[in-house]
Image (cartoon, helix red, strand yellow):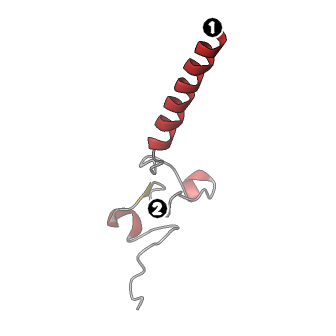
């Protein structure tokens, strides 16, 4: 009887942990370093690497001086 109860509690805890893990979504770290300043490291999740070597999605990261990622190129059609 005790082993059935223990097994049930373990299963409940396992389900709770799996549910919490699935709820966590990976997001880019706005403080991640990239580019020349970080030995050529690239940003994750499609973020741009700014001229200052930081990852992000805002125009300040993807605009003038952008080192890698979906940079906004001036004069591109």
Where does the N terminus fall, quadrant-wise?
Answer: top right
Label 1: state its secondary structure. Answer: helix
Where does the C terminus fall, quadrant-wise?
Answer: bottom left
Closer mark to the observer between disc 1 and disc 2 = 1
Residue marked by disc 2: 47
Find residue 13 and name its label.
none
Choose top left, top right, bottom left or bottom right for residue 6.
top right
Is 74 rendered above or below residue 65? below
Residue at coordinates 40% horizontally, 68% vertically from top-left?
A: 62
Q: Residue 67: give x, y in percent of width and height.
A: 51, 67
Is 66 rendered above or below residue 42? below
Residue marked by disc 1: 2
CA separation in Å, label 1 and label 2: 52 Å
Q: Residue furthest bottom?
A: 77
Question: Mark 2 or mark 1, which is nearer the start of the sequence?
Answer: 1
Q: How many marks?
A: 2
Q: Are marks 1 and 2 in contact (CB under 8 Å)?
A: no
- In this view, the residue in front, 1 or 46, is 1
Q: Residue 3: give x, y in percent of width and height.
A: 66, 12
Label 2: state its secondary structure. Answer: loop
């Amino acid at each position: 009887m005790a082993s059935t109860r223990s097994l049930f509690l373990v299963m409940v805890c396992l389900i709770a942990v799996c549910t919490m893990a699935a709820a966590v979504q990976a997001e880019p770290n706005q403080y991640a370093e990239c580019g020349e300043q970080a030995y050529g490291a690239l940003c994750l999740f499609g973020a741009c690497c700014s001229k200052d070597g930081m990852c992000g999605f805002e125009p300040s990261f993807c605009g003038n001086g952008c080192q890698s990622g979906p940079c906004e190129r001036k004069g591109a059609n």
